[in-house]
Structure formats: C-alpha cells, structure tokens
Image (tube, rainbow, N blue to C red):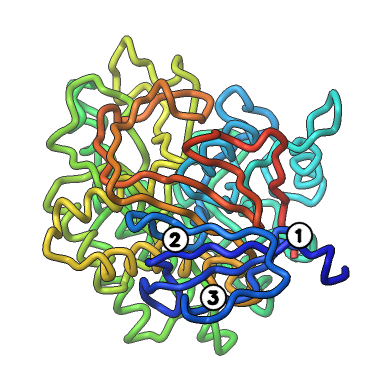
Amino acid sequence: MTKEENEIKAIICDRIFYDGKLQSGTLIYSITNGIIIKVASQSEPLPENLTHLEKLPNSSLIIPGIIDPHVHLNEPGRTEWEGFYTGTKAAVSGGVTTVVDMPLNAIPPTTTVVNMNTKLQAMRCKNNNSNKLFADICLWGGLVPDNISDLKPLVKRGVKGFKGFLIDSGVDEFPKIDAKNIDAIFDELLNEDTVVMFHAEFDNGCCTNEGDPSKYSTFLNSRPDSFEVDALQIVIDCMLACKQRNGKSPRVHIVHLSSSECIQLIKQAKTQHQLPITCETCFHYLALASENIPDGKTIFKCCPPIRSNKNREAIWKGLFDGVISTVVSDHSPCTPDLKNLGKGDFMDCWGGVCSVGLGLYLLYSTMKKEHSTMSSNKLWSHIVTWLCENTSKQVGLEQKKGFIKEGFNADFVIIDDSQHFKIDNNTTYFKNKLTPYEGFKSECKVMRTVLRGINVYSEAEGHIETPIGKCILD
C-alpha cells in the first residue's frame, strides 16, 4: 500500500481514554487498514498525509470498543430466538464492537469442529452469501460429557475457550458435566492457550419448587445461593487436584456470578491457593434487585437468578475490589411464547435476559446515580477496565482490541454524556424485544460506533448498509 492509498483520519477530542485515563488528544487511524496509528497530543502537528479531520464537541468522549464475551446468538437452529444479523446490529448500537458467541442454544452446539463449521457457514446469507455480522465475533466451544477428544481440535480451529454446565442447561443437546469430566478436561487442556468456563450452579437437592409460581420469590428460593457456592467449590477442588497432579491448572473463568456468597471463595482461590481463576457478573445483577420484580413479570427470569438488593450491593463491592473482573450481558433471548408472558409463571418459562448493546447505559447510569461523588475519570476508568480491557484479556484479544493504542484495531465508541434517553423495548435492535429495562433512563448516549476504522453505527445515520464484521479465529 502506498502512502497516497492510505486513507488517514484524525479525531480531535478533549476526552479520550488512553494510557489509563481520560485526557485530551488526537486519535489518528487508518480507515484503509483499520489500525490506530497513534494518539497524539493536541499540540502536535497533524500528519501531512491526513485525508479526514474532525473535532468533537466538549460533551463527547472516546473509549475503546466494548467487548461482550457472553452473548447467545443462537444461530443456526434457534434463529427465531436471535441471529447473527440482529444480535450484532443490537451490539454495535450500544458501542459493542466484538461479541463472543456462547456454544449452546444453537443447533448444533459448538462442541465439535464439524458443528463449528456449520456455525461459520450460518454467518453468511444463503441467498447471496452476504455477511450478517455488524460486529466482530469470536466463538466459545462447549464442554459436554462426550466431546473431550474434540477440545484440542477446536482450540486449533480458533475457539477462544470452553464453557460447561454443572446443572441442567435447559436444552437437551447440551448436557451437564460433573467433577470426573472436569478432571479429564483439565488434564486435556492443561498446556493449551485457552480458558475453561463454568456455569457454576449445582443442584444439591436442598430445595423444592413449592409456592405461588407467579411470585418471583418462589423461583428465587428454587435456586438459592448454595447452588452457586457448591458448584464453585467443585470447580476449585478440581483445580486444586489438577495442580496437585500436574503442578498447575488451566485458566478458569466463572460466568455470570450472581451470589455474593461466592466472592470470598474466589478471593481465597486466587490469593491463598494461587489459582488462575477469574469471574464475571452481569448488568442485570448490578442494576436490578429481586424486591422490585413484580408478580408475573417473567421477563426478569434468568439463571442464576437476580437476588436481593443487599446481595446486589455486595456484588458491586466485589467488582470495585477487583475480585470480579468483568461485566457482561449474558444476552439470552427467546421467543415471547417461551417467556409465558400471559401466564406469568416463573417456574414454567425460559430463563434469560435480553440486553446486548444496553450494558453501557445500564452500568454508567447506575454508577452515576449510586456513586454521585465519583469523578468522571474514575467512573469511566472502571467502565473501560470492566467492559474493554479485562474482557479483551479473557478472550485473548489484548494485543489487538480493548485498548486505544498504537497498532491496535481502530475499534472505538464516541459517547455524549450530556445526552439522556429512555430505553424503549420497541426500538431495540435484537430480534425479540423482551427486556426488563423498559423506561430505564440512560445518562449517556452512544453517538457513533467505529469498527476497524469504519462507522458501523451512528445516532444520526443509523447502521452501516453492508455489515463488515469478521469472525476472529486467530
């Protein structure tokens, strides 16, 4: 590529998050190859070969593109629940430039290379082979009792890690695993550059499903804290046993932690036992509380469940303390009939919250309301750490995404934190518009989402006409 062919843009902004803080600067990047050239001070001369220059208003700020590593896109097989086109369209509308697709709810699940290839084919439209991806996408593989011989081939093919359940997953084609399976999985993946993830709930038989099914408390009591605590202990015991056998354990990540009773266990595993374990929580566990869930409102059901406000506050503390490292959507959609909205039965409906692309609004607005004395720089530093930097490290993308840095992908979000709006289910972009956030007031607005140097969404113009997202397998 010659100098003349390289299309260079510079954006001057008083608040760009780079080098660990918000500061003024000029973001210079190539539209041609989608790479950041540098972040210069505003006093530095602009490049001679500059082809585009933009100065943002004082109310704007720029952060790295958000990485959401917990999204169920469900295609192929359950595309009526979601899909690559609608799911990634929703993602970029909220500043998410990369999503990582969970291995289950699609048919077939991503548990073999053959199944993975079927999923890759589904990312293209059958009629004209056009691309369905507005955001970049990575894939998680699945852990089921009979696919241990498929794990290394899946790593070689490009999955970023593996997820398994210690409790019924809700779909027949993705059965749960037990401690014996985990031992074998750890030994198999010990020397692979990957991460092993767990839906950490274990049905210990302590509870019944008795009570009024229209009451959220009935559902909450059926999946108590002890389900998560016991499952986490099983995982930690398996890590310790693997370390005893082999001198080390694979990296482990606990998905969607909802019980604050697990925080001390995670902390001890990391500090006392020196185990390579991390965990995430979800936007709904930080923004919602069980006391406020109305009777029959099954759109609030998810697994693990939304717990008490006291628990919610403790989850926030675990996040601020660094025990919990990331915040994700766990976008787990379904069709309206599976939510049994008319019946209002929490015990007889699908569990999952739709929220891909809404997370920035939920997190920022809740933090601003509940931590009003926190400086803007500190607030945005937390958000970038939890949604961009730590998520990139979990997925193994920290050398190309999650930071505004020279040589990285030009993935970034332009935000106006002087503008407000209310979440309206009818104007969301995912396929089934069923969120518990109707009427939630956001204290900021995404003005533009840029993926590899290209505007894929703007508040003024909407979405790019031809999606440019890629599936990242390296």
State the CA–CA distance, disc 1 to disc 2.
20 Å
Residue 177 at least partly seen? yes
Q: Earlier in the sequence, mark 3 or mark 1?
A: 1
Q: Quadrant of residue 379?
A: bottom left
Residue type at the position of mark 2: Ile
- Quadrant for the N terminus, please: bottom right
Q: Quadrant of residue 340?
A: top left
- The residue sitting at 38% across, 55% down in the picture is 57
- Quadrant for the C terminus, please: bottom right
Q: Which residue is mark 2?
A: 62
Residue 141 marker: none
Residue type at the position of mark 3: Val
Q: Which residue is mark 1?
A: 32
Residue 39 marker: 3
Q: Nearer the viewer, residue 8 or 111?
A: 8
Describe residue 439's horizontal placement relative to residue 169 as left or right. Answer: left
